[in-house]
Image (cartoon, grey):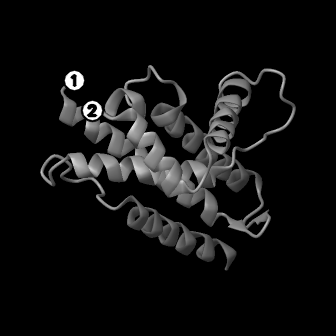
Amino acid sequence: MDRIKRLRRVVLLCCHFARNFAYYKSGWEGKRLKVPNEFWVTVNGNFVDICVLEWCKLFGDDSDKHHWKQIVVDKDRFKSEMLDKLKVSQYDFEECWKSFRKYRDKFLAHLDSLEKMDIPYLHIAWGAVRFYHSHIVQLCSSEDLKGLPIDVSAYYDNCLADAGRIYEKLKT
Protein backbone atom coordinates (compact mmCIF):
# COMPACT_ATOMS: atom_id res chain seq x y z
CA MET A 1 0.00 0.00 0.00
CA ASP A 2 1.44 3.37 -0.93
CA ARG A 3 1.89 6.13 1.64
CA ILE A 4 -1.05 8.29 0.53
CA LYS A 5 -3.45 5.33 0.78
CA ARG A 6 -2.14 4.58 4.25
CA LEU A 7 -2.58 8.21 5.32
CA ARG A 8 -6.13 8.23 3.90
CA ARG A 9 -6.91 5.15 5.95
CA VAL A 10 -5.60 6.80 9.10
CA VAL A 11 -7.92 9.75 8.45
CA LEU A 12 -10.77 7.33 7.82
CA LEU A 13 -10.11 5.52 11.12
CA CYS A 14 -10.04 8.85 12.95
CA CYS A 15 -13.40 9.72 11.38
CA HIS A 16 -14.85 6.33 12.31
CA PHE A 17 -13.86 6.99 15.91
CA ALA A 18 -15.31 10.53 15.80
CA ARG A 19 -18.63 9.39 14.32
CA ASN A 20 -19.10 6.54 16.78
CA PHE A 21 -18.06 8.71 19.73
CA ALA A 22 -20.60 11.35 18.67
CA TYR A 23 -23.36 8.77 18.31
CA TYR A 24 -22.49 7.27 21.68
CA LYS A 25 -22.46 10.66 23.43
CA SER A 26 -25.71 11.70 21.80
CA GLY A 27 -27.52 8.74 23.31
CA TRP A 28 -26.97 9.90 26.88
CA GLU A 29 -28.93 12.28 29.05
CA GLY A 30 -26.75 12.83 32.07
CA LYS A 31 -26.01 9.34 33.43
CA ARG A 32 -28.85 7.51 31.72
CA LEU A 33 -29.70 6.56 28.17
CA LYS A 34 -32.25 8.71 26.38
CA VAL A 35 -34.06 5.60 25.10
CA PRO A 36 -33.44 2.81 27.63
CA ASN A 37 -34.82 -0.21 25.80
CA GLU A 38 -32.81 -3.28 24.82
CA PHE A 39 -32.37 -2.25 21.19
CA TRP A 40 -30.97 1.22 21.96
CA VAL A 41 -28.85 -0.06 24.83
CA THR A 42 -27.24 -2.50 22.38
CA VAL A 43 -26.82 0.15 19.68
CA ASN A 44 -25.21 2.55 22.15
CA GLY A 45 -22.88 -0.18 23.42
CA ASN A 46 -21.88 -1.00 19.86
CA PHE A 47 -20.83 2.62 19.30
CA VAL A 48 -18.43 2.35 22.25
CA ASP A 49 -17.07 -0.95 21.01
CA ILE A 50 -16.27 0.52 17.59
CA CYS A 51 -14.59 3.51 19.25
CA VAL A 52 -12.35 1.13 21.16
CA LEU A 53 -11.52 -0.98 18.12
CA GLU A 54 -10.73 2.01 15.91
CA TRP A 55 -8.68 3.74 18.61
CA CYS A 56 -6.64 0.59 19.13
CA LYS A 57 -5.82 0.51 15.41
CA LEU A 58 -4.42 4.03 15.76
CA PHE A 59 -2.81 3.84 19.22
CA GLY A 60 -3.10 0.31 20.61
CA ASP A 61 -0.37 -1.87 19.13
CA ASP A 62 2.91 -0.34 17.92
CA SER A 63 3.16 -2.83 15.06
CA ASP A 64 -0.30 -2.15 13.58
CA LYS A 65 -0.21 -0.64 10.08
CA HIS A 66 -2.05 2.52 11.08
CA HIS A 67 -0.53 3.00 14.52
CA TRP A 68 0.97 6.45 14.83
CA LYS A 69 4.45 4.99 15.35
CA GLN A 70 4.24 3.35 11.91
CA ILE A 71 3.14 6.60 10.24
CA VAL A 72 4.78 9.54 12.00
CA VAL A 73 8.36 10.40 11.10
CA ASP A 74 9.42 12.30 14.25
CA LYS A 75 7.89 10.07 16.92
CA ASP A 76 9.35 11.87 19.94
CA ARG A 77 8.12 15.25 18.76
CA PHE A 78 4.67 13.89 17.88
CA LYS A 79 4.19 12.29 21.29
CA SER A 80 5.50 15.31 23.17
CA GLU A 81 3.27 17.71 21.22
CA MET A 82 0.26 15.41 21.59
CA LEU A 83 0.65 15.17 25.37
CA ASP A 84 1.13 18.93 25.57
CA LYS A 85 -1.95 19.59 23.42
CA LEU A 86 -4.04 17.15 25.49
CA LYS A 87 -2.66 18.60 28.73
CA VAL A 88 -2.01 15.11 30.08
CA SER A 89 1.06 13.42 31.44
CA GLN A 90 2.76 10.40 29.94
CA TYR A 91 1.34 8.43 32.87
CA ASP A 92 -2.23 9.61 32.17
CA PHE A 93 -1.93 8.69 28.51
CA GLU A 94 -0.53 5.26 29.38
CA GLU A 95 -3.44 4.69 31.78
CA CYS A 96 -5.85 5.59 28.97
CA TRP A 97 -3.98 3.23 26.64
CA LYS A 98 -4.12 0.42 29.22
CA SER A 99 -7.85 0.89 29.73
CA PHE A 100 -8.49 0.62 25.98
CA ARG A 101 -6.33 -2.46 25.63
CA LYS A 102 -7.91 -4.11 28.68
CA TYR A 103 -11.44 -3.42 27.44
CA ARG A 104 -10.60 -4.67 23.95
CA ASP A 105 -8.64 -7.74 25.02
CA LYS A 106 -10.49 -8.82 28.15
CA PHE A 107 -14.08 -7.80 27.41
CA LEU A 108 -14.78 -6.97 23.79
CA ALA A 109 -12.68 -9.52 21.91
CA HIS A 110 -12.59 -12.41 24.37
CA LEU A 111 -14.85 -11.77 27.38
CA ASP A 112 -12.24 -13.30 29.62
CA SER A 113 -12.90 -12.91 33.31
CA LEU A 114 -14.22 -9.36 33.54
CA GLU A 115 -17.70 -9.47 35.00
CA LYS A 116 -18.72 -5.96 34.08
CA MET A 117 -18.27 -3.58 31.21
CA ASP A 118 -15.66 -1.00 32.25
CA ILE A 119 -15.77 1.56 29.45
CA PRO A 120 -12.46 3.36 28.90
CA TYR A 121 -12.32 7.10 29.46
CA LEU A 122 -13.00 8.36 25.94
CA HIS A 123 -12.08 12.03 26.27
CA ILE A 124 -8.30 11.58 26.31
CA ALA A 125 -8.67 9.15 23.43
CA TRP A 126 -10.78 11.66 21.47
CA GLY A 127 -8.12 14.32 21.99
CA ALA A 128 -5.45 11.93 20.71
CA VAL A 129 -7.57 11.13 17.64
CA ARG A 130 -8.06 14.84 16.89
CA PHE A 131 -4.34 15.44 17.23
CA TYR A 132 -3.40 12.49 14.99
CA HIS A 133 -5.99 13.48 12.38
CA SER A 134 -4.71 17.05 12.31
CA HIS A 135 -1.14 15.82 11.96
CA ILE A 136 -2.04 13.63 8.98
CA VAL A 137 -4.09 16.36 7.31
CA GLN A 138 -1.01 18.62 7.44
CA LEU A 139 1.00 15.97 5.58
CA CYS A 140 -1.47 15.67 2.72
CA SER A 141 -2.83 17.78 -0.06
CA SER A 142 -6.57 18.37 -0.36
CA GLU A 143 -6.51 16.09 -3.40
CA ASP A 144 -4.92 13.30 -1.33
CA LEU A 145 -7.83 13.43 1.12
CA LYS A 146 -10.60 14.15 -1.37
CA GLY A 147 -13.96 13.02 0.00
CA LEU A 148 -12.74 12.73 3.61
CA PRO A 149 -13.41 15.20 6.44
CA ILE A 150 -10.50 17.60 6.86
CA ASP A 151 -11.82 18.95 10.17
CA VAL A 152 -12.57 15.95 12.39
CA SER A 153 -14.06 18.13 15.16
CA ALA A 154 -16.58 19.65 12.74
CA TYR A 155 -17.35 16.14 11.49
CA TYR A 156 -17.95 15.03 15.09
CA ASP A 157 -20.24 18.02 15.68
CA ASN A 158 -22.27 17.18 12.55
CA CYS A 159 -22.61 13.54 13.63
CA LEU A 160 -23.60 14.61 17.15
CA ALA A 161 -26.29 16.93 15.79
CA ASP A 162 -27.57 14.29 13.37
CA ALA A 163 -27.85 11.67 16.11
CA GLY A 164 -29.44 14.24 18.41
CA ARG A 165 -32.23 14.82 15.89
CA ILE A 166 -32.87 11.08 15.69
CA TYR A 167 -33.01 10.69 19.47
CA GLU A 168 -35.40 13.63 19.74
CA LYS A 169 -37.77 11.96 17.26
CA LEU A 170 -37.66 8.77 19.34
CA LYS A 171 -38.69 10.62 22.48
CA THR A 172 -41.90 11.99 20.92
Q: In which quarter of the image is residue 28?
A: bottom right
Q: How many marks?
A: 2
Q: Can residue 107 be seen in this view?
A: yes
Residue underneath mark 2: 6
Residue 61 x %, y %:
52, 24
Who's the residue at 84% across and 22% down the image? 113
Q: Quadrant of the C terminus?
A: bottom right
The foreground one among 2 and 95 is: 95
Horizontal side, residue 147 vs residue 51: left or right? left
Residue 162 x %, y %:
48, 69
Horizontal side, residue 49 vs residue 161: left or right? right
**Label whose residue precedes the other's in the sequence (2 or 1):** 1
Residue type, mark 2 in image: Arg
Residue 36 x %, y %:
77, 61
Who's the residue at 40% across and 46% down the image? 132
Horizontal side, residue 3 vs residue 25: left or right? left
**In the depicted structure, whether residue 120 falls above or below residue 101:** below
Q: Is mark 1 on a helix, strand or loop?
A: loop
Spatial CA distance of label 2 from label 1 is: 7 Å
**In the depicted structure, whether residue 156 falls above or below residue 114:** below
Mark 2, residues whose alpha carbon is within 10 Å: few (<14), some, or many (≥20)?
A: some
Evaluate if marks 2 and 1 touch, with contact meaning CB atoms under 8 Å apart: yes
The foreground one among 99 and 168 is: 99
Who's the residue at 33% across and 45% down the image? 11
**In the depicted structure, whether residue 12 falls above or below residue 68:** below
Horizontal side, residue 142 vs residue 82: left or right? left
Q: In which quarter of the image is the N terminus?
A: top left
Q: Can residue 20 be seen in this view?
A: no
Residue type, mark 1 in image: Met
Who's the residue at 25% across and 51% down the image? 138
Which numbered circle lies on residue 1? Answer: 1
